[in-house]
Image (cartoon, grey):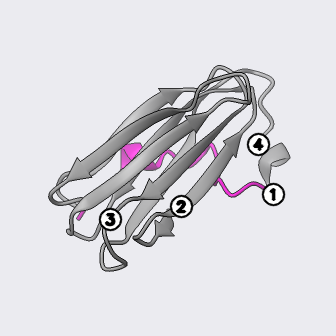
Amino acid sequence: HVPINGEDSAESFRFQKQVESVQVLLQTDGRPLHARIELVQGPNHSKQTIDVFSEDGKSQPFFAVIDTPVESTIRVVNTAPNMAFPLTAAVEPYMVDDSYDPSADEDDEADLDTSDHFFFVNNMN
C-alpha cells in the first residue's frame, strides 16, 4: 500500500501490456476519501478518469477492477483539500496473460507481486 498525502499529491503505477486488468483499492484511516483515478493508455488514447468520494474511507473504501488492454499507467491523485486527509492506494495486476513477467516491472512504482491477493485477504479493521 502506498500512502498519498492530500492537496493533489499523486502516485503513478505502470503496467505492461500483458496485464489485462488491474485492481485498485483506496482507503483512509476513517477520514473522508477524495481521489481521482486516471487511466492513461498512451498518446493516442484519451485519458479516462474516475472521481471518488467517501465520507469514511475505512468503513467505505473504494475498490474497482479496471481493464487495461494495452500498456497502461494508473495515476491516483489525492484531491483532498489539505494534508490532513491522506489515503493509501494499492494498485496491482488482476488478470494477466501467460506471457506476463512480473520481474520486468521491478523498477516501476507498482507492487506487482501477483502472489499478494490483498483484496481477498485484506482485513479492513
- Going from N to C along the chain, the mark reached first, 1 or 2, is 2
Determine the residue positioned at 48% across, 69% down.
Answer: 3
> Residue 100: where, in percent of width, then height?
77, 30
Q: CA distance from mark 1 to mark 3?
A: 29 Å
Q: Is residue 114 magenta?
A: yes
Q: Is residue 112 above or below residue 31?
A: above
Residue at figure coordinates x 45%, y 44% from the top left: 37
Quarter of the image holding residue 64?
top left
Residue linked to disc 3: 80
Asked which secondary structure carries label 1, the reply is: loop
**Residue 14 sits in quarter:** top right
Residue at position x 55%, y 35% in the image: 39
Residues under labels 4 and 1: Cα distance? 10 Å
Residue that numbered label 1 is attached to: 107
Counting residues from the start of the chain, the first of labels 3 and 4 encountered is 3
Residue 44, numbered label: none
- In the image: residue 85, left or right of residue 114: left
Marks 3, 4: nearer the viewer:
3
The quarter of the picture where the C terminus appears is bottom left
Indicate the secondary structure of the residue bearing disc 3: loop
Give the amino acid type for the residue marked by disc 1 in the picture. Asp
Count of labels in the image: 4
Number of residues whose C-alpha sits closer than 10 Å to that of mark 2, classed few (under 14), some (14–19) or many (20 or more)? some
- Amino acid identity at mark 4: Pro
State the image coordinates of residue 78 (x, y, percent, origin top left). 41, 61
- Span colored in magenta: 107-125
